[in-house]
Amino acid sequence: MISPHPWLEHLRRHLDVARLGRDPEGVHQMRVALRRLGAWLHLGGWRVLADDIGWLRRNAGAVRDFDVLLERHPKEPLGPWLSRRRERARGALLAAIDAPRAAGLLEALSLAPPLDPDRARTALEGLAHRVETRGKRALESAHKPKEIERWHALRRALRQLRYGMEWLELPTKPLRELQDELGELGDLAVLQRQLREYPEQRHVAEIAAQLEHATERALGNARAGWRERHDAVLAAVPRTRPWTST
Amino acid sequence: MDLYLIRHAPALDAAPGGSDAARPLSPKGRRRFAQSVDGLAHLGLTFDLLLHSPWLRALETAELLAGLVRGETRVTPALAEPPGRPLLAELSGAGAAPVDPEGRLTRAPRRVAAVGHQPWLSELAAWLVLEDPEAGRQFQLGKGGVLWLRGEPAPGEMHLQALLTPKLVRALA
């Protein structure tokens, strides 16, 4: 039986670090723990608590996105503007961390019964199927904005499958490699979203042009990465029944 | 808003040295409440929001109801204590019907379910209907039973629509 407690403790520790705000790793690790606990709930077939995890994770994600962007763009014109937006996101995160809903989530997770590995293995197959479907859709996309969105959807599904497999202590090397290849596209999309909201577009025209090139390159890497690795990714998932590739 | 106060299904006794909060549903309680959920589905009932206490028996009851939820579920620690202003604020926020810029309702008032414990659910009902939480004994609610209230979630501002006993809810299935 698989207990959520190791990652629950990880979450508790990093909620405190995130609250203090001195080390960006606090928010990052808080988000990682929430994602892993979300995968644990999914493997157990739980519907409740998933929205609570998503709510807290989105609050952490907003701050984490700014932390990553500020590492790459600390100077004018973007840096100070991003910092102000980060402060607003941090205010919302602190309110969420201290909300009764967050305390209730921790209490409920601490009371939830451990996960049955057989049930988890069956759930893994559903996650693997989702990865394959999303990969296929991304590759078939004809329009760029839609394609980017579909690679993100694949990355999310892949991450959930990987975390699910790690709960079962299964090897995940091909999944991690593909996840890394898709990661760049994710970071670029976060920057693109922020740039769209920047008030003086002419000040960021150069960054926008660089971003366009980088996105093209990242899309090429995503397509190549999926073509090269999808067999290995799907083969890593244990099957309780024969797998038919679509 | 329509508010459905639902008492958790029958649970096992606490394990030796175990906490009350960690009591799971009994197999029979789980089976019977699954029938109750079928009964509620038969009525065409769905929820825009499901609030539940963090205690295990409420969590497991809420999970059985999850198929009737069309919106969000939210863990609500205020359902695991005597009813107070924080719970009313939570219900009030949950029940607010969205309005357009002209103040017209954009959709029907929300249907909210709250899964919790006794005597607090009865006290909450008495507070919302009679303005008197101490009159909770007038709202007897068996395990797996449903109290249906309608109105604004403020003291004395709700009306009792129905008290569905567990047996009646199962019979609807």
Image (spheres, rainbow, N blue to C red):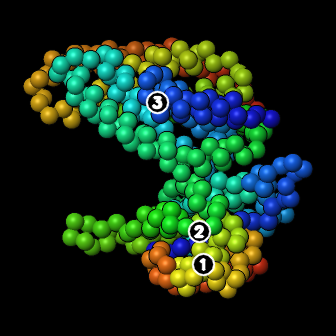
Q: Chain of mark 3?
A: A
Residue B86 placed where, x, y %?
51, 62
- Relative to A84, B145 lies left or right: right
Residue denoted by label 1: B133
Task: Kindly state the secondary structure of the residue where label 2 is placed.
Answer: loop
The residue at the point 51 percent across, 28 percent down is A17
The reply to whether the C-beta atoms of the residues labelled 2 and 1 are less than 8 Å apart is yes
Residue denoted by label 3: A20
Q: Above or below — where is B168 with respect to A60?
A: below
Residue denoted by label 2: B83
Is there any visible trace of residue B147 in the rendered image? no
The residue at the point 9 percent across, 25 percent down is A202
Name which residue type carries label 2.
Pro
Residue A13 placed where, x, y %?
59, 30
Label 3 and label 1: CA atoms lie apart by 40 Å
Name which residue type carries label 3.
Leu
Q: Tag 1 or tag 2, which sits nearer the N-term?
A: 2
Quick one: which residue is furthest to the left in this view? A202
Specify whether disc 3 shares its chain with disc 1. Answer: no
